[in-house]
């Protein structure tokens, strides 16, 4: 056999034995049979030979070509069958950690707040989001001509139901069904037809609190809320109780915390002693019970704690935002 063809056949034989993957096999094919492959080049060489030598040389090249082609097709079949590992697998490499999901920042803040109150003995309760005017307004001592009842402040359904605009509805639902002592918090969604901007959304979350018992004073309210705010914002947090008005509490306050280096005050929640008219609406006997209630916005607190300046981030599900809370 011609030395050149014999050498190519030998080289191909050795190369075929070393192949472990389909990629390598393809590289081998190109190396021998491609446009500039070794066998192809030998064939080109054929033309330069004297006519009488061409026949034998041609047969020899053809032999090498068939040898390589059948080697490739055998190997290909082997590599494609499942019991042959196709890729080299290095089991000493550390695994790629799967990305675990995380709770939404609103859920995280909501659960943290609920946990502080459950430690103080409050029970978590739920209420419907589609409500009656009675539970959202009337029972809460909100007069019929109050502007918050207007359709530009509350979403109504065609059946005269509404999407609750505050979690205070749950105060009513719980008192309708339960005799005091009551100590509950009610987290959930509320809806208001606000124009969406950096600080407004037509849906947000509130947490309502209600405590009813035989002897409940305004100092009890202050004690509970001071403890809560110091648990949430740090033990040195300064608070301020500022007179305010809510139809369903009397007296009412807004509670501020000292915030920022220039010690400004920031409103955090609304609260007050339960108005006797509310007890009357749920059928409690006059003068028998006392209580306090409070309500706070979860988004607002989450924004303060994390330095978020646009409420819309919470609802857009941009992973670049959400992953900062995992
Ligand atoms: N419901 C009030 C609001 O949405 C908050 C509040 C709740 C105030 C309970 C006092 C008592 O603004």
Image (tube, rainbow, N blue to C red):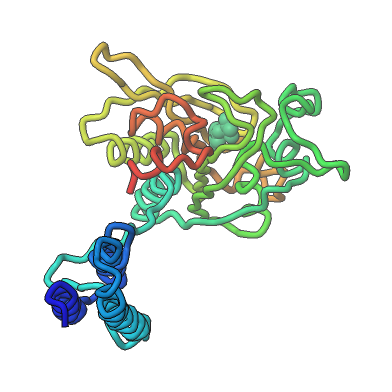
Point out residue 269 in the picture as x, y percentages from the top left corner. 46, 30
Q: Residue at x 25, y 67 (%)?
A: 50
Residue 150 lies left or right of residue 24; in this view the side is: right
Total label count? Answer: 0
Q: Nearer the viewer, residue 296 or 173?
A: 296
Q: Nearer the viewer, residue 27 or 68?
A: 68
Res. 249 in view: no
Work out whether 95 lies above or below 107. below
Residue 157 lies left or right of residue 20; in this view the side is: right
Residue 258 lies left or right of residue 2; in this view the side is: right
Q: Nearer the viewer, residue 241 or 304?
A: 304
Which residue of the protein is positioned furthest toward the top in this rendering?
262
Which residue of the protein is positioned furthest toward the bottom in this rendering?
83
Q: Residue at x 61, y 37 (%)?
A: 203
Res. 100 in view: yes
Point out residue 179 in the picture as x, y percentages from the top left corner. 60, 59
Q: Residue at x 69, y 29 (%)?
A: 193
Point out residue 304 in the picture as x, y percentages from the top left corner. 37, 29
The image quarter containing residue 150 is top right
Point out residue 95 in the picture as x, y percentages from the top left corner. 21, 66
Picture quadrant of ligand 1? top right
Residue 253 lies left or right of residue 170; in this view the side is: left
């Amino acid at each position: 056999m011609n030395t050149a063809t014999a050498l190519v056949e030998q080289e191909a034989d050795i190369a075929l034995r070393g192949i472990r993957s389909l990629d390598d096999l393809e590289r081998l094919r190109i190396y021998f049979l491609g446009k500039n492959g070794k066998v192809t080049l030998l064939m080109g060489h054929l033309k330069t030979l004297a006519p009488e030598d061409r026949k034998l040389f041609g047969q020899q090249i053809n032999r090498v070509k068939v040898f390589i082609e059948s080697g490739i097709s055998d190997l290909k079949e082997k590599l494609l069958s499942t019991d042959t590992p196709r890729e080299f697998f290095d089991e000493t490499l550390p695994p790629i950690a799967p990305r675990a999901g995380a709770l939404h920042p609103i859920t995280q803040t909501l659960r943290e707040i609920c946990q502080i109150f459950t430690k103080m003995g409050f029970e978590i309760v739920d209420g419907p989001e589609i409500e009656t005017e009675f539970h959202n307004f009337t029972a809460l001592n909100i007069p019929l001509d109050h502007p918050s009842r207007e359709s530009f402040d509350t979403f109504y359904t065609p059946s005269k139901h509404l999407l609750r605009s505050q979690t205070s509805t749950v105060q009513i639902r719980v008192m309708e069904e339960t005799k005091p002592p009551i100590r509950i918090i009610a987290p959930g969604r509320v809806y208001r037809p606000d124009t969406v901007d950096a600080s407004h959304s037509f849906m947000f979350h509130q947490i309502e609190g209600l405590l009813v018992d035989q002897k409940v004073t305004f100092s009890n309210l202050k004690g509970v809320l001071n403890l809560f705010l110091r648990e949430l914002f740090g033990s040195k947090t300064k608070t301020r109780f500022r007179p305010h008005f809510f139809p369903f509490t009397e007296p009412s306050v807004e509670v501020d915390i000292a915030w920022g280096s220039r010690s400004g005050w920031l409103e955090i929640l609304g609260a007050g002693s339960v108005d006797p008219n509310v007890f009357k609406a749920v059928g409690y006997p006059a003068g028998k019970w006392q209580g306090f209630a409070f309500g706070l916005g979860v988004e607002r607190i989450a924004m303060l704690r994390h330095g978020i300046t646009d409420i819309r981030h919470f609802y857009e599900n941009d992973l670049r935002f959400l992953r900062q809370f995992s």
